[in-house]
Image (cartoon, rainbow, N blue to C red):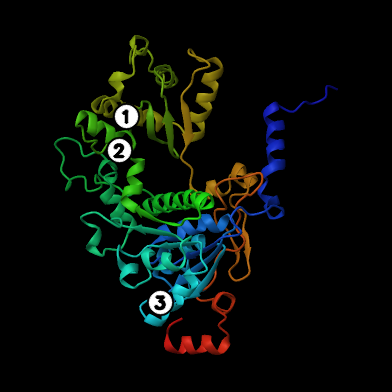
Amino acid sequence: MTDYKRAKWAQWADHVRSLDDPAKNYDKPEALDDLVVIDVSSRSMAGCYCSSLLAELGAETIRIEPPGGDIVRTYSPQGIQQKGTGFAYLQEGRNKFHVTLDLETEEGREIFRQLAGNADVIVETFPAGKMDAWGIGYDALSKANPRLIFTSISFLGQFGPDSGRGQYDYDNVSQARSGIQYGTGEVLPEGKTADEMPWAVPTKAGPWIAWSVSGTFAALGILAALHHREETGEGQAIDVSTPEAYQRLHDYALHWYADQGVVQERFSNLDTALWLYGFFPTKDGGVFLGGLRLEMWKAFVDILGKWDEWEADSWTTLAPFMKKDWQLKYQAMINPLTSRFTSEELTRKSIEYARSGRLAPITPVVAEIVSPWKTMHDENWGDRGIFTPVQDPFFGSVVCAQAQWKATETPPRTKWVCRPAGHDNDFIYLRYLGYGPVRLAELKEKGVI
């Protein structure tokens, strides 16, 4: 019997797993375990997302909420809550110590000043100028703690003609202000009205996408500031505007306008920079189809049996297919054809074509649009540990997305999911300020914590 020899890619996968398997994270050090981060964000998941990234890397992260908890704890589908906490906050409360403190009171602000004196990083999401008006902004706190990195995530930024509005940052408002949402959603065909096609309107992108982007950029800015501080000993202020951060994802649309004066209009699931590139219906749902090269588009036409009818052999460039009217024409022709097959059947056709088709090994990309259920039961993600349940001491077994990157030496990790509002008052206030039970009871009686 011939010995079975594993493929080289499988040997490589085994080697990499031995280095960065998430199951072995707890044997390794944490990159930011010497940092103290205070997250005093309010009404915004951007700040929570930012501090989650730091907390996953080991930073001791103290989440400050008003007595009773921040409103973000209520964000949850259909208002469902687990022990007073919504599903959205279960995801972003990870690895954080939770204390309560009323910054509307002078005594609360004085306590915050003392905590800030022990901090390396502060993350806040109040409207521009709010923290300064309270006397706990960057200028005031950096005098006592010049190494402090003070990170503000806001709707309109800390300066600019609109920054003084005092408006809180809301994800969908930031999506709208970014300019990106203008080009999303179903196309309104010529001659049709919004009354006839009320669904043909700009469409929001995913849950908290703008907040997630600004929170990510804020975390990146913090890491850069930490490196600068290591070299110079200086702290600094970081100013992130959520629509501005989200605009970074606008990609070529900004250049198209700046160079050609063209405003990208709504274009449904298609893309004027690529073809074949979009989502198409199938018998059991839908697939993403990607061509990217003329030969791949021709291969897909061949798979559909339209090579001769559509005269694919005569096509010499993709340029005409980049035009909106061409794409809409061909989309209307493709939709009924892909609807005859299941997603699996189309995928299999692409694989078979790569083996024996007219243009083999060239073939289009076909990817099923999977449901959340199928994603969470996908063997690949299960093997990589992204949905491994966290055994949380308060909430029990909770499935939440684990850290989104692996690392061989200082991997991120989820140690616990969340804590109730004020759960760590005793521990944190005693550790940093020396407050015992009597002092805490007094502050609680006053409503300060």
Q: Badge 2 local density, few (<14 within 10 Å), some, or many (20+)?
A: some
Q: Which residue is mark 2?
A: 268
Residue toward you, 386 or 411: 411
Q: Badge 1 local density, few (<14 within 10 Å), some, or many (20+)?
A: some
Residue 357 spot, x, y in % from top left: 51, 15
- For image coordinates 16% across by 39% down, the residue present is 192
Residue toward you, 142 or 330: 142
**Residue 199 appears left or right of 425:** left
- Residue 153, above or below 257: below
Q: Earlier in the sequence, mark 1 or mark 3?
A: 3
- Residue 270, above or below 155: above
Q: Which residue is most to the left? A: 191
Q: Which residue is mark 3?
A: 109
- For image coordinates 26% across by 45% down, the residue present is 179
Q: Badge 3 local density, few (<14 within 10 Å), some, or many (20+)?
A: some
Label 3: element kind = helix
Residue 301 spot, x, y in % from top left: 40, 20
Q: Which residue is most to the right? A: 1
Query: What number is the disc on residue 331?
Result: 1
Query: What number is the disc on residue 318?
Result: none
Q: Amino acid at mark 1?
A: Gln
Q: Earlier in the sequence, mark 2 or mark 1?
A: 2
Q: Amino acid at mark 2?
A: Ser
